[in-house]
Structures are given as C-alpha cells and as structure tokens.
Image (spheres, rainbow, N blue to C red):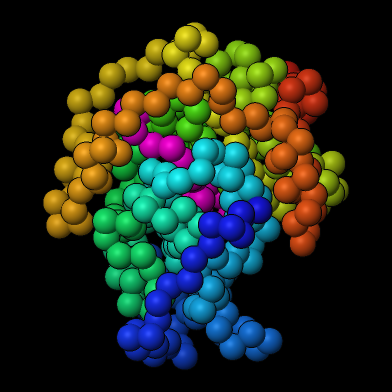
Amino acid sequence: MARRSRHRRHDRSSRTAPTLPADEVPIDTGTARIEPDPDHSSRVTLHVNGVPSSCLDLDDPGFLAFEYLQQMAAVVDLLPAGPVRAVHLGAAGCALPRQIDHVRPGSRQIGVDVDARLLALVREWFDLPRSPALRLRAQDGGQALDGLTPGLADVVVRDAFDGDRTPAHLVGERFADACRRALRPGGVALANCADRPPLTTTRAEVAAFAEAFGPDAAAEHRLAVVAEPAVLKGRRYGNVVVAAVAPSPRRGATGGRESGAARPEEADDADGAVDSAADSDDRHPDTLPDLGSATLGRALRSLAVPAQVLTGPALERFVGTTTSPR
C-alpha cells in the first residue's frame, strides 16, 4: 500500500488531454482497445488482444486498480524511502511504473515490452513519466534482463503473458537467477503468476526462486507468495505474486555468471542516462526487507481486497516437494 506522505501530483495545467480512440487499434502483436470506466470519467482500461492489461486513472498517477499490482506496491514499500531503479518486463500501459514514479520521485525505470507499436501508443495516450524517469524499450523481456548490469536494480517486475501463460523463457531457474544477478543486495524481484487450483505453476515458480536466491530464502523471509486467501487455498483461479529478496553477499549468495553487457543507460543513448551518483551507489544493507514482517502483513490486510502472505515454514509447506523447471 502506497505511503500517502510521499504522494505528489503532476502539474497538468499546461498539458493537453490526449484524444483516446473509441475503436480497436492495430499493434504489432494484434490489437489494443481503450475501455472507459462508466463510473469514473478519468479511469480507463487498456485491453491488449482482448485481455485487460492495465487500468489507469488519467488524473491520479498513484492509482492502481488491479489487486496484484496493489500487492506488489505493498512489497516495494518495504524498500528504504527514496528513488528506486526498477525494471518492468511486460510494460503494457505502465500502471505500476507510473505509481512508483508518483510515490518515489526521482526513480529511474525501464519498461520493456515486445510490442513497439503498443509502447508508442501508451506514450501518446497516457501521462507517463518522461525519459530518463521512465524509458520504454521494445525488446524481449529475457534479453532485456540478461543485458542489465549486475547488481544495479532495486526492483525487477515480471508481468508478461502470452495469452494466459507466462512465456516459457521467463520462468524457471535460469530466469530467477537472471533476476538475482540484476538486483542489488536487498533488491526485490516480483513475478505475477496467474494460476488455478492446485497452484502447480506457482509452486514451481517458488521452487525456482528458492534455487536462485538461496536455500535459506524462505526461512529468512526473503521469499514469499502473496494473494487473496481464496486463491492461496486453491479455491479459485487468480493472480499470485511471487516475491524474492536478493541476499547480501555475506549471506553466501550463490554465484551467477558474470555479465559483460552494457549498462542499461548505455544501451539506449536517446533515452538519457541514470545519474552517476545513483550508478555508483553500491549498497550492501545490513538489514534486508522482511517479507514476513508485521508491516507487510498489515498493509496487505488493509487493501480493498485483503491479501495474505506466506513465507517461512508456511511457504515451505506450500511448496512441498515441488521442483523447479530449468
């Protein structure tokens, strides 16, 4: 749940409201459509290939409609106050990047989507943060993640789908390990997993992150799942957020392969650079975000649709003997 004390409003006095299309618009991967909210004149839902992909309030950049995004925001709130460096794989309408920019001014974010035309349109339609606050890249999410400088990101979000499934190369131990390499110690990976009973996909995703983030990740409350209680109990289909906190080096993190890839700001010169002070900030926190904290539990229970977090022994029981895909 966003900290209201850090909220700010964009100055829209000189901004001309865009004309939003009434019909479907062709994009590289199919079609996009904007559906107005009949009960709130400033709210719209972006549909991509017939699927609701983002909901935004054009007058309130801090607004998040989808429950799983509210849950992700509550986890991000565990990070120290101030700007963050975030990478979003599956940008769509950029609802979460917009909210993070709103509550954490000065953040530097990258939104990645395979559909270049969609990214151009959401820039046109929605009041998104400008570069370098938010840079949009038409790129495969896995390639973008592999190209990040190790240890630079505070947050990595995966919210990418092909139909109702996450692309195969964005799941499994290789993907989870790429997330860990991209994060600074104490940084957070967040993965949206749409699943149905008996939550086999979610259990495998947790097992993959456990392999990548260390065998003690669950016990140390660095690994968790968040969802509505009915979803976690396997009563219905829904979204589950898998959250993983990157370990401190002194906690014996497993070593991943070193990357000689360009820094993300060097890969797209037209978008500008992250300031050098942030680049040189090599933080190794003494205290890592606690996914089992009372603070997170209260924030999740206070959402309009209350959510539950599983970590520690409860998460280990939830996963059981499930193994992760490679």
Position above or below: 291 against 247: below
Q: Is residue 209 magenta?
A: no
Pinpoint residue 190: horizontal percent, then vertical percent: 55, 41
Residue at 54% x, 57% y: name it.
6
Pinpoint residue 196: horizontal percent, then vertical percent: 73, 47
Residue 202: name its quadrant. Answer: top right
Residue at 32% x, 31% y: name it.
281
Residue at 72% x, 39% y: name it.
295
Magenta stretch, main secondary structure, is: loop
320 with respect to 52 (left or right): right
217 with respect to 48 (left or right): right
Position above or below: 188 against 133: above
Pinpoint residue 153: horizontal percent, then vertical percent: 38, 37
Label tally: 0
Q: Nearer the viewer, residue 177 or 263?
A: 263
41 with respect to 303 (left or right): left
For the magenta stretch, what is the residue range?
Answer: 150-167
